[in-house]
Image (cartoon, grey):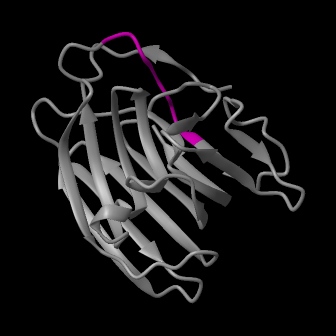
Amino acid sequence: MKKLFVMAALMAGATGMALADDLEVTDTFDTDTNWNMSSYWRITDNGQMAGADEYGTFLPLKNRASCKNLTFEVDLTMQKAKAKTEKRAGLAVYVDDQNFWTFTLAEAADAKGAKHLLKLSEMRQGKWVVVKSGDCNWQYNQTYRLKLVMTPAGLSGQASDANGQVIGSETAPIAADSITCGIPALRVMGMIAQFDNAKISGK
């Protein structure tokens, strides 16, 4: 059983979240037992986690344990847009719906040309305070491997294609008032996407 203790502070002004000790999860999504499920998520017949929401939803790890050192990987397939605004799907370090980091494949709003991007972003107290973004030639219905690493110094994200070729990467430092730890979670926004072969290591 994982040992938990109450951390002194998650970020500036936030307290009370339990911190994981040597969290190790490998999930091929045969069941949903590791995740805090909602109506926006389901296990498919072929054993993948499917998420779909127009406005944005998270799927946090069920035990709610938080990590400040985290390596989080998953296979991601972007299937279909559900919005004309910006769309995203990928990984998150989650505190609540107003405070999180995300590393995602993204598609710009239709009005901005629906350009394909890779994004590493921080929302803090409901405002985007970090957005690292670059062009990324991802394609619908192709599977990519996303990897997000978080340490006390910063975050780095990398996306690779099915052949292991890196198609993009982004990095961001941890600022004095940044979110410094959170719960591993999956993220979809304005997108139908499927996830598989999750691997999480953290503490």
Which residue is nearer to you in this view: 2 or 82? Answer: 82
Dividing the picture into quadrants, the one containing residue 196 is: bottom right
Which residue is nearer to you in this view: 52 or 166? Answer: 52
The quadrant in which the C terminus is found is top left
The quadrant in which the N terminus is found is top right
Residue 170 relative to residue 79: left or right: left
Which residue is nearer to you in this view: 79 or 121? Answer: 79
Residue 67, above or below 171: above
Q: In this rendering, does residue 195 appear at all?
A: yes
Residue 161, above or below 202: below
Dividing the picture into quadrants, the one containing residue 168 is: bottom left
Residue 173 relative to residue 21: left or right: left
Residue 131, position in %: x, y? 21, 52
Q: In this rendering, does residue 108 appear at all?
A: no
Predominant secondary structure in magenta?
loop
Residue 151, position in %: x, y? 29, 47
Which residue is nearer to you in this view: 105 or 85? Answer: 85
First to last magenta residue range: 15-23
Residue 70, above or below 133: above
Report the number of discs: 0
Q: Which residue is drawn at 62% across and 58% down?
A: 193
